[in-house]
Amino acid sequence: MRVLAVNDISCVGKCSLTVALPIISASGVTCDILPTAILSTHTGGFTGYTFRDLSDDIPAILAHWKKLGLKYDFIISGYLGSIEQIEMVKQIKRDFLKESGTMIVDPVMGDNGILYSHFDQRFVEEMKGLCRTADIIVPNLTEACFLTDTDYTAVSEQDYPAILAKLKALCPRPSVTGCDVAENGIKSCVFYTDESGKTKEYATEKIEGAFHGAGDVYVSALVGCLARGVLLDTAVEISAEFTKNSIKQTALDKTEARYGLNSESQMFKYLQALEHAAPQR
Ligand code: PXL
């Protein structure tokens, strides 16, 4: 299995490609990368970061790959710095995804009800267009609200199924992370649509606090599991548990949230769960 991860390199802060590459590779599949930009840190919680847009390099990279005849079983897109890059990802899907391949879009745009720096309503509209080309989308609750024109501040847990239904108009298998539900205290839930179109949820312990990069850990593990042939229900469970364990470790270590999740020490447990669930090869 060959995966292409299209995302930025935030040198510090453990998100995007510095999370996707180690997790997807450790899952036991080839992970090629297309960096969209290089930043000294990510943009959430840091000021004064550098940002080099790599859009000008991408056409020549893709032209070389075409000559090599590269095709992918999975393409996963993450942080895109411009509308131009959204268009590039649509073209990458057309040129490099196998006919039987899976397109996964993480519509990275914001968290805690607000858009990250550099994004505006026009970008949101274009991101809806990219989601329409995907088989699976993995927004957090904030991004799900922007994609469905829902007021984040007015959302309660009764609204999650309706948000998921609206997302299904964009893409057949949405998976929304970070949905708080009251269940023996507060639990953190993933609401998702399985292969047959059924709405499901998977709950894990909620760890209080804001943790940067949790979405990146979740989707990278999800891609790793799916690329190893694990069915979606189990892939969601394994990925949500890995993310929760990584958040727990970060809370225990008391590292600053903006430096990302300490998922490294939880990787072995994740891989054990993956090896147990994946078909033999
Ligand atoms: O974790 C998502 C992310 C990815 N890449 C960059 C970001 C963010 C979130 O802040 O700024 C550059």
Image: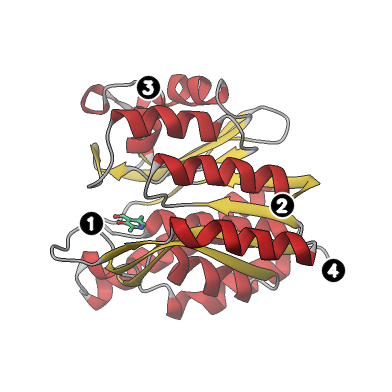
Q: Is 7 displayed left or right of 102 in the figure?
A: left
Residue 28 rendering spot, x and y as whole percentages: 69, 73
Cα separation, mark 2 vs mark 4, equals: 27 Å
Residue 121 rendering spot, x and y as whole percentages: 29, 28
Q: Earlier in the sequence, mark 4 or mark 1?
A: 1
Numbered disc 4: secondary structure: loop
Q: Is 65 displayed left or right of 210 in the figure?
A: right
Q: Is residue 72 above or below residue 257?
A: above
Q: Amino acid at mark 3?
A: Gln
* Mark 2 vs 4: CB contact within 8 A: no
* Mark 4 vs 1: CB contact within 8 A: no
Q: Amino acid at mark 4?
A: Gln
Q: Is mark 1 within 8 Å of ligand 1?
A: yes
Numbered disc 3: secondary structure: helix
Q: Earlier in the sequence, mark 2 or mark 3?
A: 2
Q: Earlier in the sequence, mark 3 or mark 1?
A: 1
Residue 4 picture quarter:
bottom right
Q: Amino acid at mark 1?
A: Gly
Task: Report the residue marked by disc 3.
Answer: 158
Residue 263 picture quarter:
bottom left
Q: Is 262 displayed left or right of 23 in the figure?
A: left
Residue 217 seen from this side:
no
Task: Report the residue marked by disc 1.
Answer: 44
**In this rendering, the label closer to the viewer, 2 or 4:** 2
Residue 135 seen from this side:
yes
Q: Earlier in the sequence, mark 2 or mark 1?
A: 1
